[in-house]
Image (cartoon, coloured by chain):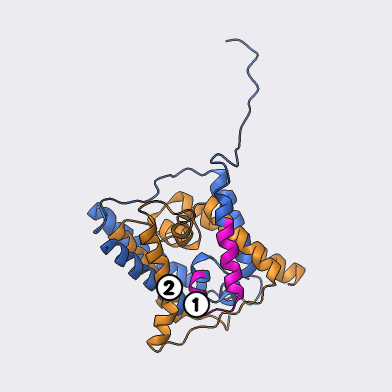
Chain colours: A orange, B blue
Amino acid sequence: MENFTPVSALLGGLMIGASAALFLMLNGRIAGISGILGGLIPPERGQAAWRLAFLAGLVITPLIYVASGGALPAIELDTSLPLLVVAGLIVGFGSRLGTGCTSGHGVCGIGRGSPRSIVATLVFMATAIATVFVTRHIIGI
Amino acid sequence: MPLILSAFASGLLFGLGLIVSQMVNPAKVLGFLDIFGNWDPSLALVMGAAVAVSALGTLVTRRRGAPVLAPRLEIPTRRDLDPRLIGGAALFGIGWGLVGLCPGPALVGLTFGPWPVFVFVAAMIVGMAIFRLVPADWPQVTFRREASRVDG
């Protein structure tokens, strides 16, 4: 457990939660990234601007973070190209079919006490853990 | 306009949280999912703290009845479980476990990550587009019952 970073994890978690709380209190909406992005494919009339604004904030953050003197964490990604494509397709398709991802179901849905989100989170945690077990400890990718 | 600004600010804060917590790093996420290996519980704390604050926000918003800037709350009200929810979540988890990226961190990583992040995001958008081709009632689970042959 030498990789455990409890302080930054709690601090970052509070910020993510604050973002979800703020978005609900001000805009009355769920800060679910797959839903916000998926709603742009294709864009609906009158619903595109706030979606783009949220996503723009998300994408721009690292630039502001660096500009204000922060050191960005590493992005360690060594997945092979075909696997990357397959995973991307599944994540995009699955999050839309299941109406949410880690943010919409995990952070917002559980925070709201939604039974659908609690079940969805348990299911995707289980399949993700199983996938990592198979790839790392059985196949050994 | 205020709705757009608040959406932008929420996006910024969300991204900041993902950076500070290092959840933008797929290796960190996979370290959490690898419970049979060298387990890194960080993600659990991120999620726990985020859920706590998000729950507080829900409580305040519900008490208030309506959001500050929008006319009404647009939150899901369904409580039933269906094959789409379970199947979608199961698929999402497999993809998440293969790479360690989910939609939020993938988008934040676009501006400073290595090029494979672009490949992942492009595939993810294609996956979301493919979803649009799926009929609204798929997958359908029908429980066919033998019609009762006995009268009465």
Question: Is residue B136 positioned above or below B100 on the image?
Answer: above
Q: Quadrant of the N terminus of chain A?
A: bottom right
How far is the residue under mark 2 from the one under mark 1? 11 Å
Q: Please name the residue that numbered disc 1 is placed on.
A: B111
- Farthest right residue in view: A139
* Count of numbered circles in the view: 2
Question: Is B128 in front, or is A14?
Answer: B128
Secondary structure type for disc 1: loop
Residue that appears at 44% across and 67% down: B48
Asked whether residue B115 is drawn in magenta, I would say yes
Asked whether residue B29 is drawn in magenta, I would say no
Left or right of B58? Residue B89 is right
For disc 1, the chain is B
Residue that appears at 58% across and 73% down: B117
Secondary structure type for disc 2: helix
Marked residue nearer the N-terminal end (2 or 1): 2
Image depth: mark 2 or mark 1 in front: 1
x, y (%) of residue B55? Answer: 36, 61
What segment is highlighted magenta in the picture? B107-127
Residues at discs 2 and 1 both on one chain: yes
In which image quadrant can residue A23 be found? bottom left
* Whether residue A128 can be seen here: no
Which secondary structure dominates the residues rendered in magenta? helix
Q: Residues within 10 Å of mark 2 (few under 14, many from 20)?
A: many
Question: Is B145 in front, or is A101?
Answer: A101
Q: Which mark is residue B15?
A: 2
Give the amino acid type for the residue marked by disc 1 in the picture: Thr
Left or right of A133? Residue B57 is left
x, y (%) of residue A135? Answer: 71, 68
Give the amino acid type for the residue marked by disc 2 in the picture: Gly
x, y (%) of residue B17? Answer: 42, 74
Question: Is residue B36 positioned above or below B129 on the image?
Answer: below
